[in-house]
Structures are given as C-alpha cells and as structure tokens.
Image (cartoon, coloured by chain):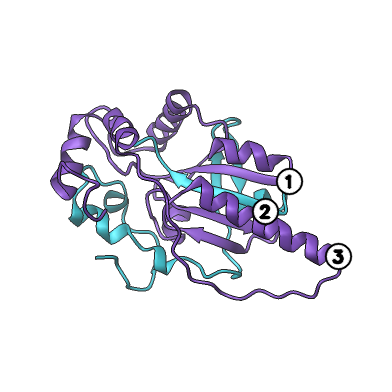
Chain colours: A cyan, B purple
C-alpha cells in the first residue's frame, strides 16, 4: 500500500538505496501523493550534470525554457 | 521520450532525465553505495539505452527524487518559475506530449490577451504495456532483479494488476 504519511525529508541512505526489490523495501518509497501540489513554489535542488560533471540547479534549469520536462528513473 | 524531447525542443521545451536510485538492483547493476558508482551507472544507461536528453544525477540520498514522491519512473513538467504544471506517477510519452500541447496552447492564448487562470484536475491516463521491453531492461540488472520482480508480481505479469 502507498505510504500516506506526510513527507518529513529524505529517507535513510540504506532504505532509499535498497539492495533488493521487495515490498518491504519498495513500497515505503511510493509517495506520489506526497509530492508538491500543482502550481506550488518548490525548494531548489542540485544535480550533477553527467555531460559536464558540474553542479546544476533545478530552478536555474527551469529558467532556460517556458516548460521543462523531468523524467525520473534509472537503468534498472 | 527521446522522440517527444526532440519534437518539443523546437518549441522551446527543455527535457531532462533525473537519475535516481536503482528500482530493480541485481548482481550486474547493484544498489548505489557511493556517488561515483551512481554516476557510472547513469553513464551506463546513457550508453546502453541511448538516452539523448541531458542526464542530471540526483544526490546519493535522492533529495530531489524523494521530495517529488520517489516513484521509480515518474514525470513532472515545471514552468519557467519552477512551479509544477503536470505530474504523472508513471512516464508515458503520449501523456506527456498531450500535456505539453495543452500548456503551449495556453501560452498562445495568453499571448493573444486571454485572461486565464489555473485550476486543479485529477484524471487517469492510459498507456500501452510492453512486457518484452520491460523484462529486457529488467534483465540488465541481472537474474536477481528478474527473480525479485517475479516474486512480488508473479511470472505472468502483467495479466493482473501492476
């Protein structure tokens, strides 16, 4: 079942980077309903650009275009 | 999603891939224990899957991913002010393209002087399932990744609910 508890901040490193795909490890991370609401003002985040190796800000990226699409995922 | 990114780039839409935790770690592509490993596995994805969008690697703790709800393959569209316009708990290129067409249309209306304001919508979109492609990607992680998935959802997935 999806976790409906209010988001309190990043989960622990080991819980987030779980070693095995099991319901116990995976389901607590399924918190889509706790994401920011449409139109809300967000906190900023930094990423490492894979191409340049430099740190980039999400808000700075957004300012480059009227709309920016962000897909989240991994190789697995 | 590469095709959608290319098509809408001409209309000033930016498209990015945020690299998260491994949803289905296995013996070949394990869970992350350091940032260097996460960067290496992001590079592996770029080479093997051929993603042409800029790849942004989140922190090892997944600060951004967790803030947005930590779903394994979600998509968010943000406007220039960095405010969310669209969020989907699973990525589907058709759904994203529909949303982009809609928001670009709103921008045209505004430029034409229309007085419009936002409101919230809840809706269910539909996507095609591709079992073969899903397991092809799952197998990249290793046999353990496949076995763990089948242990949770059964070997006949996706005949039942996902």
Q: What element carries label 1?
A: loop
Percent across and percent down for residue B41 are 40, 31
Q: Is residue B24 above or below residue B89?
A: above
Percent across and percent down for residue A9 are 40, 64
Q: Distance between the residues labelled 1 and 3?
A: 18 Å
Q: Distance between the residues labelled 2 and 1?
A: 7 Å
Question: Disc 1 vs disc 3: which is toward the camera?
Answer: 3
Residue shown at 22%/36% (left/top)?
Answer: B145
Q: Do the residues labelled 2 and 1 touch (CB within 8 Å)?
A: yes
Question: Disc 3 vs disc 2: which is toward the camera?
Answer: 3
Q: Do the residues labelled 3 and 2 touch (CB within 8 Å)?
A: no
Q: In this view, does B46 lie to the left or right of B24?
A: right
Mark carried by residue B12: 1
The crowding category of the residue bearing disc 1, from other C-alpha atoms within 10 Å (few below 14, some 14 to 19, many at least 20), is some
- Chain containing the residue with disc 1: B
- Chain containing the residue with disc 3: B
The residue nearer to you, when weighing A33 against B115, is: B115
Q: Quadrant of residue B45?
A: top left
Q: What residue would you read off at disc 2? A: A67
Confirm whether circles 3 and 2 share one chain. Answer: no
Tell which circle, 1 or 3, labels the residue nearer the N-terminal end: 1
The crowding category of the residue bearing disc 3, from other C-alpha atoms within 10 Å (few below 14, some 14 to 19, many at least 20), is few
Q: Is residue A57 left or right of residue B106?
A: left
Q: Is residue B87 left or right of residue B23?
A: right
Q: Is residue B146 above or below residue B11?
A: above
The residue nearer to you, when weighing B101 against A75, is: B101
The residue nearer to you, when weighing B135 against A8, is: B135
């Amino acid at each position: 079942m999806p976790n409906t508890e209010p988001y309190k901040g990043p989960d622990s490193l080991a819980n987030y980077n779980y070693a095995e795909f099991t319901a116990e490890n995976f389901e607590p991370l399924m918190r889509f309903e706790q994401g920011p609401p449409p139109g809300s003002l967000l906190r900023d985040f930094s990423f490492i650009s894979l191409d340049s190796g430099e740190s980039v800000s999400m808000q700075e990226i957004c300012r480059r275009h009227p709309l920016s699409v962000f897909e989240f995922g991994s190789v697995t | 999603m590469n095709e959608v990114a290319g098509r809408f780039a001409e209309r000033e839409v930016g498209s990015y891939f945020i690299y998260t935790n491994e949803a289905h770690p296995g013996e070949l592509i394990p869970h992350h224990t350091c940032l260097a490993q996460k960067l290496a596995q992001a590079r592996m994805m770029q080479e093997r899957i051929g993603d042409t969008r800029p790849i942004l690697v989140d922190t090892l703790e997944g600060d951004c991913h967790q803030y947005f709800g930590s779903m394994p393959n979600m998509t968010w569209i943000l406007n220039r002010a960095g405010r969310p316009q669209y969020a989907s708990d699973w990525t589907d290129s058709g759904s994203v393209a529909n949303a982009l067409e809609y928001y670009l249309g709103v921008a045209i209306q505004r430029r034409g002087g229309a007085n419009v304001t936002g409101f919230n919508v809840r809706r269910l979109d539909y996507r095609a399932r591709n079992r073969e492609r899903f397991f092809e990607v799952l197998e990249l992680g290793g046999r353990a990744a496949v076995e763990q998935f089948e242990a949770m959802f059964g070997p006949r997935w996706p005949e039942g609910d996902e």
